[in-house]
Image (spheres, rainbow, N blue to C red):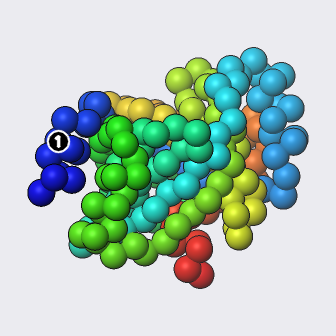
Amino acid sequence: MRVVEKLSVKVQFKVEHKMVELKAKVDGLEVVRRKLTILGAKRIGTFRQIDVYFNVPEGRLKLREVEDNNKAELIYYERENTAGPKKGDVFILKVQEAEVFKNLLERLLKTSAIVEKVREIYQYQGTQIHLDRVKKLGNFVEFERKTPAGAQAIKKNQQTLEKLMEKLGINPENLEKLSYSDLIHT
């Protein structure tokens, strides 16, 4: 019981939103990085992340830890498994004392996958762009864009991602429909 009491006061805040996203496998990240610089995208930083995925009845649940940070994010999301811009619902709970929280989750749930990556993050006109080097999987570019819930807004934001994909020269044939956790198992 002591662990749960300790955790209950360490939750920082939660975030819920709808989003559209896409992911593509790429040979290298340098060309995309160069094009982002030309477009004037703002570089946020580079982070080593470890995502521990847990078995849940629906959607995906992961605990994201960032190297040199004692905080973590518990991320639950539901999204379509389609290539191209897809819509999804995301719930993020930011917690302190990542190790304590991770130990509790591992006691309660079965781990399904561990994904280690180095993620370089950029912002461009409302879209967050990730240049990911994923251990065992290779290089990926991922776009995430928050969107209002309506069908028209979702479609508009999906089109925005498609246009950005064209600007960055990402081949539609390289679009990935699965999450990193699924790809680790294939």
Looking at the rendered structure, the secondary structure element under dot 1 is: helix
Q: Quadrant of the N terminus?
A: bottom left
The quarter holding residue 79 reads bottom left
Image coords of residue 70 (percent x, y): 46, 40
Query: Does any portion of residue 70 appear in the rendered image?
Result: yes
Q: Is residue 108 above or below residue 170?
A: below
Instruction: Specify whether 65 is left or right of 140.
Output: left
Number of numbered labels in the structure image: 1
**Residue type, mark 1 in image:** Ser
Instruction: Specify whether 13 is left or right of 22.
Output: left
Q: Quadrant of the C terminus?
A: bottom right
Q: Residue at x 70, y 64 (%)?
A: 135
Q: Residue at x 17, y 41 (%)?
A: 8
Instruction: Name the residue carrying label 1.
Output: 8
Extreme residue toward the bottom, this view: 186
Q: Residue at x 68, y 59 (%)?
A: 134
Between 17 and 134, the residue placed more toward the observer is 134
Q: How many neighbours does mark 1 have within 10 angstroms: few (below 14), some (14-19), or many (20 or more)?
A: few
Instruction: Specify whether 60 is left or right of 181.
Output: left
The quarter holding residue 72 reads top left
Image coords of residue 7 (percent x, y): 22, 45
Query: Does any portion of residue 84 appear in the rendered image?
Result: no
Instruction: Specify whether 18 is left or right of 138.
Output: left
Image coords of residue 78 (percent x, y): 33, 57
Extreme residue toward the front, this view: 2
Q: Residue at x 84, y 58 (%)?
A: 27
